[in-house]
Image: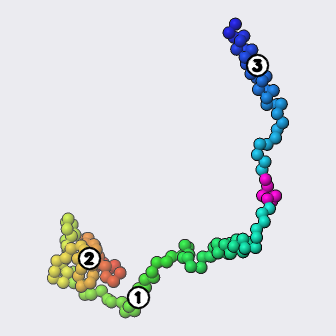
């Protein structure tokens, strides 16, 4: 009995909904106006103001920086046309097979990282002593 009541209620609801939906005429609630149909009249002063605003809002990049150029300060380096010769370094001996390799140059003991007459010692091994002088690398045997 309960199922029959539910069935009758469902049929009644569906029929009532269909009557309500299909009996109304389809008329839009809000009418849209096309922009071309809307015509606005301005007085002469308003038109001058609009024109002046449009002219002042034009984009120009004349005082702005160019994001595609590198605006870092230019550093100029000059090298002398005369290259200095490697100073006279007399290697009297070296110890390379230890935790602190050392060399005896011009009668004094030096380690890696020390500077001898402007030449920096960068490496001491069994083939010789490597020094850096004026941006060039030299090996002394």
Of all residues, the one furthest to the top in this rendering is: 1
Q: Is residue 45 left or right of residue 60?
A: right
Q: Is residue 116 at all visible to an observer of this figure? A: yes
Q: What secondary structure is found at the residue carrying circle 3?
A: helix
Q: Is residue 134 left or right of residue 14?
A: left
Q: Position of residue 97 (x, y in %)?
A: 21, 66
Q: Of the numbered discs in the image, which one, if any, rests on residue 78?
A: 1
Does 65 sit above or below residue 42?
A: below
User: Is the residue marked by circle 2 packed among few (<14), some (14-19), or many (20+) residues within 10 Å?
Assistant: many
Estimate the spatial distance between the alpha carbons at disc 2 and disc 3, rounded to whole Å: 103 Å
Q: What secondary structure is found at the residue carrying circle 1?
A: loop
> Quarter holding the N terminus?
top right
What residue would you read off at disc 3? 12
What residue would you read off at disc 2? 121
Q: What secondary structure is found at the residue carrying circle 2?
A: strand
Q: Earlier in the sequence, mark 3 or mark 1?
A: 3
Foreground disc of the pair 3, 1: 3
Estimate the spatial distance between the alpha carbons at disc 2 and disc 1, rounded to whole Å: 25 Å
């Amino acid at each position: 009995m309960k199922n029959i009541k539910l069935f009758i209620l469902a049929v009644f609801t569906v029929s009532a909904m269909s009557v309500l939906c299909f009996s109304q005429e389809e008329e839009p609630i809000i009418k849209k106006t096309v922009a071309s149909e809307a015509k606005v009249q301005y007085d002469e002063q308003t038109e001058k103001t609009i024109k002046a605003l449009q002219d002042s809002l034009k984009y120009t990049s004349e005082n702005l920086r160019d994001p595609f150029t590198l605006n870092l300060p230019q550093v100029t380096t000059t090298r002398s046309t005369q290259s200095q010769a490697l100073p006279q370094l007399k290697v009297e001996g070296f110890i390379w097979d230890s935790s602190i390799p050392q060399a005896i140059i011009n009668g004094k003991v030096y380690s890696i990282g020390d500077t001898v007459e402007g030449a920096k010692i960068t490496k001491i091994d069994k083939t010789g002593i490597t020094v850096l002088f004026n941006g060039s690398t030299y090996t002394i045997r």
